Image (cartoon, rainbow, N blue to C red):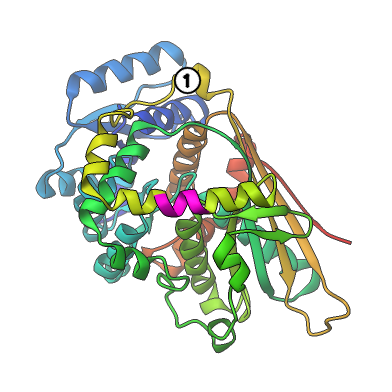
């Protein structure tokens, strides 16, 4: 279907949900006034209420159109055919997202979501990557806090080393360095229901470092010794210029996606044959790092037990709910990373440092990521467009996307270390 025949540049599906509202508000507040978009969902009265609120807040802008659609294949295909880009904020994605993904892949509609559900993304790649390649649909899952900032942070470091030293990257260590945030009901619902769909063995298969790579990992990477025995037992690692590190809650989601980016950039040649990323979270000290490592392991085992999941479902936010905006706006998140240049002289190591920081709600940042990526997909020419279709990553939107995020308030810094 020709893009000229599409009514909209973007449709936000699930716009009345917690993340969907943040997305719609950023589009109304910041995107160009001639951006043609719509909000979509099952409940027309809620959609009308949202549009009225957007009109009241931004009277100088044309309001979005309203599209009513249920999560049925025929209705979603019809919806997808109306737009260049479809943003899906309807989660948990392993429960509700597959039919949306399929509809976009088949109709050549570019797609964005904010999942961190690694087994589900692994499934979607295996089922629909080839379909999307044929239709020309650029499909980008994990374009929220999981995992756009870490993916772009790593891409920035790799690009910096290429431009300054003309070398690839060896080990890259990225971390959630500082975070003050509370989860929404949708995030908690995902954690508490995903084990109803996927087994532990499916989780382990999907979270393997190269599971989402489009090409086989190089021999050098496969033969890398990996984490030391001490780190495997304690979960603790000290990294110069980053400090004490421990396990990251979103480490598996970030790591697998970043290695997919590695493969999409010239089959891994741009990042380099020795590229390997490790994902962590900063700990105040080794004791607290070990405590978190053990607690996370126990927590994952508990989530595998149906009675525990049943109990927790009655104690947390319901999907669509989350912290009040005033409370959430006081949060902040910072990512830091160190990239080791892939140089042959061990006596002359080269390292680059990068930092990203967001002041405010993580869900606001997720809405910003979705809105700015939609604009980039609709109007720019990126590596993702040049590849022509398939399941891509945030990093394949490159400099155009990064520049938009920086303009929207994502603070970034990159430099060589002495």
Say which of 347 and 414 sits in front.
347
Q: Which portion, as a residue range, is magenta?
A: 294-298
Lateral position of residue 130 relative to residue 290, left or right: left
Say whether residue 287 is magenta. Answer: no
On the image, the x and y values in percent for residue 56 come to: 40, 11
When asked about the image quadrant of residue 186, the answer is top left
Q: Residue at x 48, y 31 (%)?
A: 182
Vertical side of 246 occupied by 368: above or below: above
Quadrant position of the N terminus in the picture:
bottom left
Q: Residue at x 34, y 45 (%)?
A: 191
Q: Quadrant of residue 107?
A: bottom left
Vertical placement of residue 403 versus 161, above or below = above
Q: Main secondary structure of the magenta part?
A: helix
Q: Which residue does the numbered mark 1 point to in the structure image? A: 325
Badge 1 density bin: few <14, some 14–19, many ≥20, Cα 10 Å: few
Residue depicted at 51% across the width and 24% down the height: 328
Q: Position of residue 104 (x, y in %)?
A: 26, 54
Q: Is residue 68 above or below residue 103?
A: above
| Quadrant showing the C terminus | bottom right
Q: Residue at x 55, y 88 (%)?
A: 219
Give coordinates of residue 25: x percent, y percent: 44, 25
Taking depth in this image into account, of 11 and 9 the one nearest to the observer is 11
Residue 81 appears anywhere in the view: no
Q: Residue furthest toward the top?
A: 56
Q: Nearer the viewer, residue 251 or 311?
A: 311
96 to the left or right of 245: left
Image x and y of residue 216, in percent: 45, 83
């Amino acid at each position: 279907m020709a893009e000229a025949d599409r009514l909209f540049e973007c449709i936000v599906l699930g716009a009345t949900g917690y993340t969907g509202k943040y997305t719609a508000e950023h589009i109304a507040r910041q995107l160009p006034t001639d951006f043609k978009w719509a909000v979509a969902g099952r409940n027309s009265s809620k959609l009308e209420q949202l549009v009225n609120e957007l009109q009241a807040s931004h009277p100088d802008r044309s309001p979005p159109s309203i599209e009513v659609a249920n999560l049925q294949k025929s209705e979603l295909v019809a919806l997808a055919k109306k737009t260049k880009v479809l943003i899906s904020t309807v989660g948990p994605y392993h429960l509700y997202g597959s039919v949306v993904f399929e509809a976009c892949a088949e109709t050549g509609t570019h797609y964005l979501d904010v999942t961190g559900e690694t087994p589900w993304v692994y499934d979607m790649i295996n089922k629909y990557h080839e379909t999307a390649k044929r239709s020309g649909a650029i499909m980008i899952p994990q374009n929220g806090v999981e995992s756009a900032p870490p993916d772009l942070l790593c891409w920035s470091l790799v690009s910096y080393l290429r431009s300054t030293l003309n070398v690839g990257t060896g080990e890259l260590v990225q971390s959630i360095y500082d975070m003050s945030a509370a989860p929404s009901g949708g995030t908690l619902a995902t954690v508490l229901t995903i084990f109803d769909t996927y087994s532990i063995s499916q989780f382990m298969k999907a979270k393997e470092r190269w599971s989402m790579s489009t090409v086989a990992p190089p021999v050098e990477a496969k033969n890398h010794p990996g984490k030391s025995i001490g780190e495997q037992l304690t979960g603790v690692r000290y990294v110069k210029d980053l400090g004490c590190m421990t396990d990251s809650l979103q480490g598996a989601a970030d790591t697998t996606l970043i290695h997919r980016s590695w493969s999409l950039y010239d089959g891994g040649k741009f990042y380099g044959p020795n590229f390997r990323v490790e994902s962590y979270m900063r700990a105040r000290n080794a004791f607290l790092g070990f405590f978190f490592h053990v607690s996370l392991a126990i927590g994952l085992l508990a989530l595998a037990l149906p009675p525990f999941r049943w109990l927790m479902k009655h104690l947390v936010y319901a999907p669509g709910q989350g912290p009040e905006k005033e409370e959430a706006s006081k949060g902040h998140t910072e990512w830091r990373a160190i990239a080791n240049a892939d140089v042959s002289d061990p006596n002359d190591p080269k390292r680059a440092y990068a930092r990203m920081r967001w002041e405010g709600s993580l869900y606001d940042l997720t809405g910003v990521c979705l809105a700015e990526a939609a604009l980039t997909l609709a109007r720019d020419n990126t590596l993702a467009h040049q590849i022509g279709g398939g399941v891509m990553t945030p990093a394949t939107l490159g400099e155009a996307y990064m520049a938009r995020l920086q303009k929207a308030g994502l603070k970034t810094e990159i430099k060589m270390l002495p």
